[in-house]
Image (cartoon, rainbow, N blue to C red):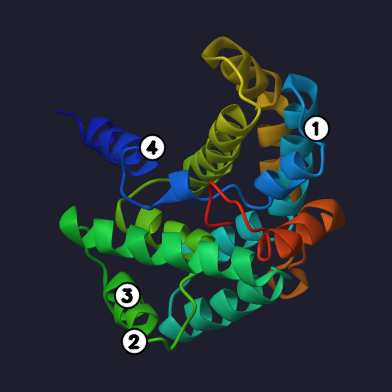
Amino acid sequence: MMPDALVLLRLLQLSDSALPTGSFSHSLGLEAVQAAGGLAGEVDLERAACTYLGALATSDLVALRGAHGACALGELLELDAELDATKLSAEARAASSAMGGRLLVAAQALALESPLLDAFGPAVHSGRSPGGLAVAHGSVMAAAGVALGQALVAHAYTSLAALVAAGQKLIPLGQSAAQRVLANLAPAVLAAVERSERTACDDMHAFAPGLEIRSMQHERQEVRLFIS
């Protein structure tokens, strides 16, 4: 088998919803949006997902870029701390860390190795670093030999797909409608990746106040289907 095909197989496996990162347990504030009456159908879901991608473009995707090209553990730790600071709600920070930590465990199971990844994993699991999902994703994709552009598109898409899957359960929404939302937002995924190029790592930020407020409200929501 050609080396490029092996890298593609790794990319597909790392992007598969079956990878045990626990993304299915998180709505990232969407459940509180639904509880407040702001998620009634397909149009609402597409609007919320587009807002989410906009925030991702200047935070998580920027962190992934830095992590993919990092040369030293200190760079990853700094990126991880900066990414964590862009997430205003406790639930959002916890969700990112939980999924990032599980991704690093999955990478071990796949026998992905690199000196940097080997150092970052213990730093996260010891509590030295938050282990944000985007930083973990960038480190793992680099170790797997996946090119930066492919890693960025994969992260943006899988993050979007997880959000849409949560919305599908909450509305509820049919499978065809959910797939239509994902197809409609394909240009927004690519735009988010392109926008991330224009944001420096030390200028990382996220602006999605509506989702952030709902995420904070979700922490005190009595009846919940999702952790976040």
Type of the residue with mark 1: Arg
Q: CA distance from mark 1 to mark 3?
A: 35 Å
Q: Of helix, strand and loop, which one carries label 3? A: helix
Q: Of helix, strand and loop, which one carries label 2? A: loop
Q: CA distance from mark 2 to mark 4?
A: 27 Å
Q: Say which residue label 4 marks.
A: 17
Q: Quadrant of residue 185?
A: top right
Q: Say which residue label 3 marks.
A: 121
Quick one: label 4, few (<14), some, or many (20+) residues within 10 Å? some
Residue 219 picture location, percent across and down = 66, 65
The numbered mark, 2 or 4, whose residue comes first in the sequence reads 4
Residue 125 picture location, percent across and down = 33, 79
Q: Say which residue label 2 marks.
A: 126
Determine contact: label 1, label 2, CB under 8 Å. no
Q: Is 153 left or right of 54, judged from the image as shown?
A: left
The numbered mark, 1 or 2, whose residue comes first in the sequence reads 1
Q: Is 48 left or right of 144, judged from the image as shown?
A: right
Quick one: label 1, few (<14), some, or many (20+) residues within 10 Å? few
Determine contact: label 2, label 3, CB under 8 Å. no
Determine contact: label 1, label 3, CB under 8 Å. no
Quick one: label 2, few (<14), some, or many (20+) residues within 10 Å? few
Q: Say which residue label 1 marks.
A: 47
Type of the residue with mark 3: Gly
Q: Of helix, strand and loop, which one carries label 1? A: helix
Quick one: label 3, few (<14), some, or many (20+) residues within 10 Å? many
The numbered mark, 2 or 3, whose residue comes first in the sequence reads 3
Q: CA distance from mark 2 to mark 3?
A: 9 Å
Residue 92 picture location, percent across and down = 62, 63
Type of the residue with mark 4: Ser
